[in-house]
Image (cartoon, rainbow, N blue to C red):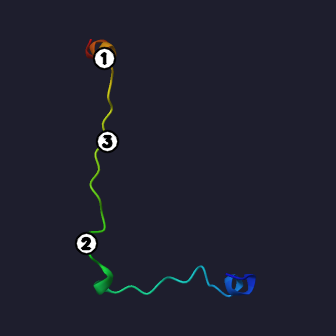
């Protein structure tokens, strides 16, 4: 892209959106785990 082309782009304009664009849910499931070494696990249980 040339400089003239990028100057004319409206970066704040929201793109068009309709229900046909949606192919699945808007969220993802994730899991978060904290893994402790076995030596620290004993200390934490006390």
Distance between the alpha carbons at the discs numbered 1 and 2: 42 Å
User: Label 3 belongs to which residue?
Assistant: 32
Nearer mark to the viewer, of 3 and 2: 2
Q: Is residue 36 above or below residue 4?
A: above
Could you tell me which secondary element the residue under label 3 belongs to? loop
Q: Is residue 29 above or below residue 14?
A: above
| Vertical comparison of 35 with 2: above or below | above
Mark 1 sits on what residue?
Answer: 44
Q: Quadrant of residue 8?
A: bottom right
**Mark 3 and mark 1: span between their CA atoms?**
19 Å
User: How many numbered discs?
Assistant: 3
Identified at 29% across, 86% down, the residue is 20
Residue 33 on image: x %, y %: 30, 36
Q: Secondary structure at mark 2?
A: loop
Q: Which residue is mark 2?
A: 24
Q: Secondary structure at mark 1?
A: helix
In this view, which residue lies farthest toward the right? 3
Q: Nearer the viewer, mark 3 or mark 1?
A: 3
Q: Residues within 10 Å of mark 2 (few under 14, many from 20)?
A: few
Q: How far from the left and from the top, in percent, is residue 32?
A: 31, 41
């Amino acid at each position: 892209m040339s400089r003239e082309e990028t100057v004319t782009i409206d970066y704040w304009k929201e793109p068009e959106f309709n229900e046909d664009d949606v192919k699945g849910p808007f969220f993802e499931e994730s899991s978060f785990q904290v893994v402790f070494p076995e030596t620290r696990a004993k200390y934490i249980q006390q």
